Image (spheres, rainbow, N blue to C red):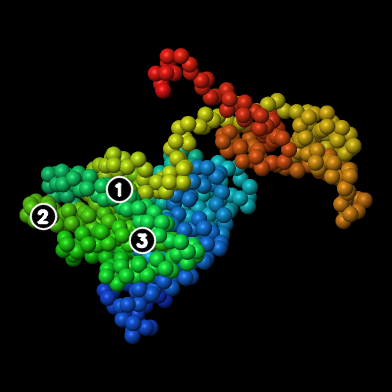
Amino acid sequence: MALALVVGCGAGLGAIAFRWLIQTFTHLLSGHGDYSDAGHAAHPRVPWLGPWFVVLAPVVGGLLYGPLVQRFAREARGHGVPEVMYAVAHRGGRIAPQVAVVKALASALCMGSGGSVGREGPIVQIGSALGSTVGGVLRVPEDRRRLLVACGAAGGIAATFNAPLAGVFFAMELILRDFAVESFGAVVLSSVAASVIGRGVLGDEAFLTLPAFHVADPAQYLLFALLGVAAGAVGVVFTRVLYLIEDACDWAWRGPEWLRPAVGGLLLGGLLLALPQMYGVGYPVLENAIEGRYAVGLLLVLLVGKIVATSLTIGIGGSGGVFAPSLFLGAMTGTAFGVTADHLMPGGAGAVGAYGLVGMGAAFAGSARAPITAVIVLFELTGEYSIILPMMLAIVLATLTGRLLSRDTIYTLKLRRRGIDLDGARLVSPLADATVREVMEELPTLLPGTLSLEDAADVIARSGRGILPVTGRNGRYAGVVTARAVAEALTEPDPALDAHTTPRTVADLAERPPAVTSGTPLGGALHPLATAEGTGLPVLEAETGEPVGWLTHQTVLRALHTTTPPARSGPEAAQRR
């Protein structure tokens, strides 16, 4: 809990710095606070270029963040959330520390120069990298490190969007993909801490200002249900087009990767020249649409334009999230649906903006299949309970539509294209529920800490293990000693040590390996076992810290062998084939 609080505070400060970077680069490269609402205005510092400066802005931004990403953190390219999901599921929550800095700079430059992406992917990766770094520095077990990664993601979402509940459920539903009670408490604490810091600096207003809506006629629920299906389909189309354009960019580009964002920025700049509403995140345009300021034709143009602009930004190597573009697409879809329904049913369809609002959550649910997060996000945006029922109906139907039309979400498809199946890994792992206690061996005899190195060398040689636990001079567990350490101390004494500091007993050589307790999930013990010196690790009792067993590579392989179902033969096998 203490670490969750620290990570939450760090994520809140990171969100503040990230928001400041976006505003700074947007002002610098466009001359406006948000160019998406400025029409075809010129840059105040280069007025002689007129609106044509938007063709050059993505090129300049690409020249800055392209080499930065290529040189220091290639995983900062793209929308970020899949990389965090992979780190939690397969890498024990390990994320390189430099990712936070590189992601913040690259994403802020990308959005500030016109990249049509959102803030959620970068801030999730920034907060998660912070949580992973804290866990790595303190050498916490892998399950705790994964939890700290989720805490960082929750804190980042909570602070940057002023949505503490959304941060919690985003981390639980998409990052951890689990709702364990133990995890929930830490994630909530981190989200609250980040929100308090974010609100203290950025204010207490939601990141979108939307009018209040309500449902006047129960018959409108049928319209909201139809909207849920339509917006879910739009979310799936967005996913398919995103990776289709990314594949096309991969196929077309043959130059160095660091130059790709700058050259591709010419295409993005041409699109921004035609549709300046696509510059950056585009929240003002979204608000205007929900308030009914656009005709249906323009709404559809903005819908298609956002799909292409976001896909092109990611495809050329840009850095940014897809959550905000999903909301944008849902707003355009929902508002266009509401205007059409109002024309067909004058006075019976209700407020047009209500459909835009519900469409936001439905499009995100269709692309990400995170219905709980979608409901919570929109509820926090509006604070209107009256919109909850049609929102839940549309979001559930959008989620089902997304599942029917696509096997993967907008996040998991990126991983599956690399050959990584998060769901499949969970389903087929024979050790998913096993703990270290179930497979550990009997504890070898502990070496007395007062034993001389010569005698210790003889005992270790006869044990056949290459590593043995050691007691301290007080008789309690002090760590382990390896045959290599003993041999080096006997044959190659360190010339920098004097006679008083030269190791004389095994207690002088004892080292504490990564802690593995008897209740640790076996999957969480694999990394400490693989990186430790020697052929095994002591298994400690969580309460006392004393060794109660021994874990080796052979015990893990034996457990894998015994939990694998035997090969079938005969007619049953033929029927299965």
Report if residue 327 is visible in the image.
yes
Report if residue 156 is visible in the image.
no
Q: Which mark is residue 342?
A: 2
Q: Marks 3 and 1, how far apart in space?
A: 17 Å
Q: Marks 2 and 1, how far apart in space?
A: 26 Å
In this picture, residue 136 sits left or right of residue 376: right
Q: Which mark is residue 68?
A: none
- Residue topped by disc 1: 236
Residue 277: which quarter of the image? bottom left
Residue type of the residue flagged with mark 1: Val
Indicate which disc, 2 or 1, sits on the residue closer to the N terminus.
Answer: 1
Q: Position of residue 501 (x, y in %)?
A: 88, 50
Helix, strand or loop at mark 3: helix
Badge 1 density bin: few <14, some 14–19, many ≥20, Cα 10 Å: many
- The answer to whether the residue labelled 2 contacts the one labelled 1, judged by CB atoms less than 8 Å apart, is no
Helix, strand or loop at mark 1: helix
Quick one: 203 or 360, which is closer to the camera? 360
